Image: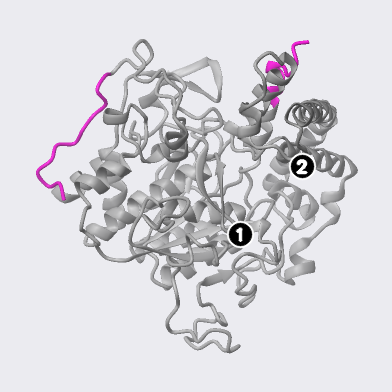
C-alpha cells in the first residue's frame, strides 16, 4: 500500500504540466458549521509551524481539522501522567537510537541483553526491544507475484485471482514505463533549472523561495518542486531516485524477474506456507542496512505515536506515556501472513495493549492465521489499529488484508479499528485523495497527509498515507488507555468512534472530483478522530 501514494502524486503533478511551454464535566464539541463546502472555515495557507503539526490542531479554535491534541494536553491532561502503555509497532523496523525515540522504547526486563540466551524462555533470544521477523530481508515480492510463482502448490481460486492481477500489471508496466521515463525527464529538467537559478547543486526550500519573481521559467520549476515537497518528497532528487526505482520495477516485471526470486528461502531459510517451523529472524530492530534506510517507514510511524514530548527536539508524539515495542515484519514488498500473525501474538504475549499495523495487501494465502491472531489479541485485551489502504477505493467491495471481516460482512472481534486518512483542507477535499474508504470496513478517519515525524539517523521528514493516520489514532488510543486503564480494548475502540467530529458535507473520493459522497457514508462512524472529545467521553464511562 505504501508506494501507490508517490506514483499517484507524480502522475497528478505531471498531468498538470511542468513548463507551460480531566474534563469529566465537559461537553463534547462539534464542528462550528455544517456546510463546509459553501462556507470553508480556512482559506489561508497553513503557516510553516501549522503545516508541521497540523494533526495536533483543533477545528473549532484553529480551523484546522486536526485531532485537538494540543487542546487536550492544555485543558485536560496537564499534570496527569497516567499509566504506561505498551504500543507494538509492526512495521519495517525502527531506528532505536533516534534522539526522539530512544527514551520511549519498550524493554524486556526479563531478558539479559546480548548474552546469546533466551533468558525469559519465550523462544526469542535477546529480544530486548522486540523482534525482527524478517531477518535480513529488505526487498520482497508482492503477494500476487509470490502466488503466481508458487501456483503449483496453492488453491486454484487464490491462484486465479493473483494471475489476473499479475497479467494486468504486466500490461500496465508496458505503458507506465514510458510514462515514468517522460516524467523523469521533466523532473530532471526542473532540477537543472533550479540548480541554475539558485547557483547550488543541492538547494533548499529557502533557496527556491528566493528565486527572482521575474524568472518565469524558474518560477514554474519552483511550483513543480513545491507540489512534490507538499506531498512528502524531500525534493526533486528524491523524486528522481524514486522514479528510477519505479522504472526499474517496471523493467523487472516485464522481464519476469519477480517470478525467479524467493527472498524468504534464500535469506531467512523459512517456509512461508508452514506455520510450525520454530523461531526465525533476529533482534536487528532497524533491519540489516547499517544506514537504517529501510527503517524509515517504521521510524516515522513510531514518532507519530510516541516521539518524546516537549524535549526541545523535532516533533511531539500524540501519546505522552508510551513504550514502543519494535516488531519488524514489513519489507519493501508485501508482508507475509505468517510474520504478521506471529508478531501479533508476540505483542499480545509480551504486554502490548495496542498494536499499530500500517501495512496491507489485496491477496492472502493464509488469512486464517492473521484472523486467529487478531482473536487471540482480543482475548488478551489488545486493540489493533489498522491502516485502511492507499488505493482510493471502497473496501466494502474489495477485500483488503488484514481486516476483521470479509468485505462488508460481520466482524470477527471488537478489538480491530480501521483508519482512513484526512487531508488538512476542511472542505470537499477533506478526505485524502489516496485514502480507501468504506461504510462498513473503515471505522474512522484521522490526519494522514504531509505528516511530519521522525526519520532514521536523528532526522525528521514529512510522509503521507493511511500509514500515518493509523499511528495518529493509535496515539489517541494509547492516551485513553493510559488515563482510563480499566476500559477494555473494545470500549476504547467505541470511544474513538463515538467521540469524533462529524460533518454533513459531501467529500471527494479517490481524488476524483466527479465522484463524491456524504462524509458519513465513507466510514462506519462518520467521524474524524478527536483526542479532546475522546477523553471527555472516556471519563463518562
x, y percentage for residue 448?
A: 48, 38
Q: Quadrant of residue 107?
A: bottom left
Q: Would residue 471 be found to the left or right of residue 258 on screen?
A: left
The colour scheme used to paint the residues is one colour
* Residue 328 horizontal/vertical position (percent): 58, 63
Query: Where residue 457 is drawn, which disc sits there?
Result: 1
Q: Residue at x 44, y 28 (%)?
A: 46
Asked whether residue 29 is drawn in magenta, I would say yes
Number of numbered discs overlaid on the protein picture: 2
Q: From the viewer's perspective, is residue 132 above or below residue 160?
A: below
* The label number, if any, that marks residue 241 in the structure image: 2
Q: Is residue 459 highlighted in magenta?
A: no
Residue drawn at point x = 57 percent, y = 58 percent: 458
Q: Nearer the viewer, residue 131 or 122?
A: 131
From this viewpoint, is residue 84 visible?
Answer: yes
Where residue 516 sits: x, y (%)? 47, 17
Label 1 and label 2: CA atoms lie apart by: 20 Å
Indicate the secondary structure of the residue bearing disc 2: helix
In this picture, residue 57 sits left or right of residue 337: left
State whether the magenta stretch is mostly helix, strand or loop: loop
Q: Quadrant of residue 93?
A: bottom right
At horizontal 23% and vertical 46% (from top left) the residue drawn is 74
Q: Which image quadrant is residue 518 in? A: top left
The reply to whether residue 541 is in sight is: no
Packing grade of label 2 (10 A; few <14, some 14-19, many >=20) is: few
Instruction: Mark 1: give few (<14), some (14-19) or many (20+) Cα within 10 Å.
Output: some
Range drawn in magenta:
11-33
Q: Is residue 484 left or right of residue 148?
A: left
Residue pushed farthest left? Answer: 25
Is residue 180 found left or right of 110 in the rendered image? right
Q: Which numbered disc, 1 or 2, marks the residue closer to the eye?
A: 1
**Considering only order in the chain, which callout, 2 or 1, is on the residue closer to the N terminus?**
2
Amino acid at each position: 500500500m505504501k508506494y501507490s501514494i508517490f506514483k499517484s502524486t507524480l502522475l497528478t503533478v505531471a498531468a498538470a504540466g511542468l513548463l507551460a511551454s480531566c474534563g469529566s464535566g465537559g461537553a463534547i464539541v462539534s464542528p462550528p458549521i455544517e456546510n463546509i463546502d459553501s462556507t470553508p472555515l480556512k482559506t489561508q495557507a497553513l503557516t510553516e509551524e501549522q503545516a508541521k503539526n497540523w494533526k495536533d490542531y483543533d477545528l473549532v479554535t484553529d480551523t484546522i481539522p486536526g485531532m485537538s491534541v494540543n487542546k487536550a494536553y492544555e485543558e485536560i491532561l496537564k499534570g496527569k501522567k497516567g499509566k504506561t502503555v505498551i504500543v507494538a509497532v509492526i512495521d519495517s523496523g525502527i531506528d532505536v537510537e533516534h534522539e526522539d525515540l530512544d527514551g520511549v522504547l519498550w524493554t524486556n526486563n526479563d531478558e539479559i541483553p546480548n548474552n546469546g540466551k533466551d533468558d525469559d524462555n519465550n523462544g526469542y533470544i535477546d529480544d530486548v526491544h522486540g523482534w525482527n521477523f524478517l531477518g535480513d530481508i529488505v526487498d520482497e515480492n508482492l503477494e500476487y507475484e509470490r502466488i503466481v510463482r508458487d501456483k503449483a502448490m496453492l488453491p486454484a481460486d487464490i491462484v486465479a485471482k493473483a494471475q489476473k492481477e499479475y497479467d494486468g500489471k504486466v500490461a500496465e508496466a508496458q505503458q507506465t514505463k514510458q510514462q515514468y521515463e517522460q516524467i523523469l525527464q521533466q523532473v530532471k529538467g526542473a532540477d537543472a533549472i533550479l540548480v541554475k537559478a539558485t547557483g547550488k547543486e543541492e538547494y533548499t526550500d529557502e533557496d527556491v523561495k528566493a528565486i527572482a519573481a521575474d524568472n518565469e521559467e524558474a518560477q514554474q520549476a519552483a511550483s513543480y518542486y513545491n507540489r512534490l515537497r507538499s506531498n512528502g518528497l524531500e525534493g526533486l532528487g528524491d523524486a528522481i531516485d524514486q522514479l528510477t526505482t519505479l522504472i526499474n520495477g517496471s523493467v523487472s516485471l516485464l522481464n519476469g524477474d519477480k517470478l525467479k526470486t524467493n527472498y524468504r528461502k534464500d535469506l531467512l531459510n523459512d517456509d512461508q506456507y508452514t506455520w510450525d517451523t520454530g523461531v526465525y529472524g533476529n533482534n536487528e530492530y532497524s533491519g540489516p542496512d547499517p544506514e537504517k534506510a529501510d527503517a524509515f517507514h517504521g521510524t516515522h510511524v513510531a514518532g507519530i505515536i510516541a516521539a518524546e514530548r516537549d524535549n526541545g527536539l523535532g516533533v511531539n508524539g500524540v501519546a505522552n506515556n508510551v513504550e514502543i515495542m519494535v516488531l519488524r515484519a514489513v519489507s519493501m514488498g508485501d508482508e507475509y501472513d505468517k510474520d504478521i500473525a506471529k508478531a501479533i501474538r508476540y505483542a499480545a504475549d509480551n504486554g502490548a495493549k495496542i498494536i499499530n499495523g500500517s501495512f496491507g495487501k489485496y491477496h492472502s494465502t493464509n488469512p486464517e492465521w492473521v484472523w486467529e491472531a487478531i482473536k487471540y489479541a482480543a482475548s488478551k485485551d489488545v486493540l489493533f489499529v489498522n491502516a485502511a489502504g492507499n488505493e482510493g477505493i471502497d473496501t466494502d467491495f474489495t477485500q483488503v488484508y488484514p481486516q476483521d471481516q470479509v468485505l462488508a460482512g460481520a466482524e470477527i472481534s471488537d478489538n480491530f479499528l480501521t483508519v482512513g486518512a484526512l487531508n488538512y483542507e476542511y472542505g470537499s477535499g477533506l478526505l485524502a485523495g489516496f485514502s480507501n474508504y468504506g461504510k462498513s470496513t473503515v471505522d474512522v478517519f484521522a490526519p494522514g497527509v504531509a505528516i511530519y515525524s521522525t526519520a532514521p539517523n536523528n532526522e525528521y521528514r514529512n510522509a503521507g498515507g493511511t500509514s500515518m493516520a493509523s499511528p495518529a489514532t493509535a496515539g489517541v488510543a494509547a492516551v485513553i488507555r493510559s488515563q482510563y486503564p480499566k476500559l477494555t480494548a473494545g470500549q476504547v475502540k467505541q470511544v474513538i468512534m463515538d467521540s469524533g467530529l462529524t460533518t454533513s458535507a459531501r467529500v471527494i473520493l479517490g481524488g476524483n472530483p466527479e465522484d463524491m459522497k456524504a462524509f458519513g457514508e465513507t466510514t462506519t462512524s462518520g467521524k474524524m478522530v478527536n483526542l479532546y472529545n475522546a477523553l471527555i467521553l472516556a471519563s463518562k464511562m
